[in-house]
Amino acid sequence: MTSTETSLETSPESSPDPRTAQAAPGDRRRWLALAIVMTAAFMDLVDVTIVNIAIPSIRQDAGASWSQIQWITAGYALAFAAGLITGGRLGDIHGRKRLFLLGIGGFTLASALCGFAANPEMLVASRILQGAMAAMMVPQVLSIVHATFPAHERGKVFGLFGAIVGLGAVSGPLLGALLTEWNLFGLEWRPIFLINLPVGIAGLILGSRFITESKAPKALKLDLVGVVLVTLGLLMLLYPLTRGRELDWPVWGYVSMAGSIGVFGALVAYERRKGVRDGSPLIELSLFRVRSFAAGVAVQTVFGVGLGVFFLVWTLYMQTGLGWSPLRAGLTGVPFSLAVSTAAGLSVQKLVPRFGRKVLQTGALTMAIGVLLYIWESEHYGLGIAPWQMALPLVVMGVGMGLIVAPLTDAVLSDVPREHAGSASGLINTVQQMGNALGLGLVAVVFFGRIGDRLTPAEVGPAFVNAFEHALGWVALVMFAIFLLMFALPKRPAQHVEGGAEDAPEAAPSGDRERELVA
């Protein structure tokens, strides 16, 4: 390439190819783009948990039945999980910026429909739409990061992402409690959805200006058969888990979950043939030959199970078992949130480059210790436990979680070729949601299975406390299992060398690239 060609390609008047576009390291706009996509990710994380706090208000004000309440929460989760892989692949094909803007615009519209819902049926339908739009938006977040930032800066970025995860985990219940108790303009529960409107509109306007478009470097086609199979398989697995307890675990639920294994098997076989035939599978199976990705996905799934169990039983324990108000329960989680955010930033920027995999394993053991400490305090103080007495175990757990969430994301994506960033991001988010759904399903066994059907008012508190302690024992076991699984992760993070294969995947054939990564 001549110097003239170089100057023409980098001049402001020229239009860079969105298939290989990447913001220059000195371009400050990429940090504005990061702030935009991180805010969108935070909005989604908050929206997953904010509804739980407002359920009593929704049921009373909207006259929703318990079945409709179940669908207000489950409809979002099912649509979100079922659409994540497809959303990621659509970003690879049509452009991550385009899909992000379409997703955040649709999410904002769906939030408005939720906030102005005239009846429970409209609220359920709007929540399903909201989950589907989130499935288009969320996979683009990590894909845009992967395509916008050079390899040596991604560790810092994923540290920020981990901090956002920590804030979102607790901010949802706290924000939901505040908005519900304030009853702004007499709107009862509606502000928990309407608060998304200014954030979404700002993200749509700013994102169209500051986010750089990117897509897969080679032309891809949408795999419609793959979309049908992955959606069917996820629904067959997740729907019974979501509704099983309410329906008293019917036989068809077990048949559906068992049948999902066959559907996923058919998906793998079809995707393998699809990849050989035209190179445009929905799921890039070659990613699982990358050791860091395959091991990281396994850890993400099991980690999601533990978090799914903990956050639900924790909320039930405080509000039903201890009889605390939503606001008091939300404020109790602040130390946890701060600990996650602080540890996440330190882990990627300072600790992982020096100690590698040991940081993540230390995080798993630290979380297990925090859970065991929580069990001891619950047994010691019983129903008289105060929020400040929960602070120590929550901080210990938060530090452990912070040591995991940010470097784990970096480990999973560090060796992924950029042309498959959308597919990989969709897979990561999907297995997280699958893990959470499995965790929620286990709550029926490890928590509600310890509570009798007919309790007097005096028996409710002790029964919930006992069930909480039992469930936390299972969470501790999950954390020890994660510690062992992490031995499959690379000992050290990938060496990010500017201009190497990782930053220019198109420079080498895919087969050579895969052999390098596996080695």
Image: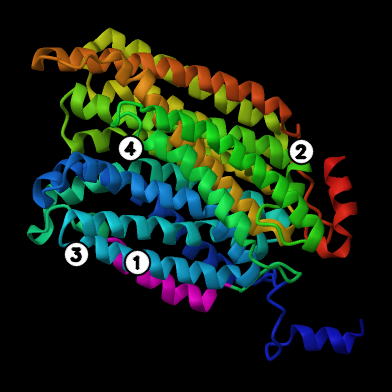
Mark earlier in primary sequence (2, 4): 2
Label 4: state its secondary structure.
helix
Label 1: state its secondary structure.
helix
Disc assigned to residue 291: 2
> What's the magenta region?
195-211
Give the labeled residue for mark 3. 116
- Is 119 on the left-hand or right-hand side of 269? left
> Three-letter amino acid code at disc 1?
Thr
Mark pair 3, 4: CA separation: 30 Å
Give the foreground label among 2 and 4: 2
> Three-letter amino acid code at disc 2?
Arg
Q: Looking at the magenta stretch, what is its main secondary structure?
A: helix
Q: Residue at x 25, y 60 (%)?
A: 114
- Residue 8: x and y in percent read 79, 89
Label 3: state its secondary structure.
loop
Give the foreground label among 3 and 4: 3
Give the labeled residue for mark 1. 108
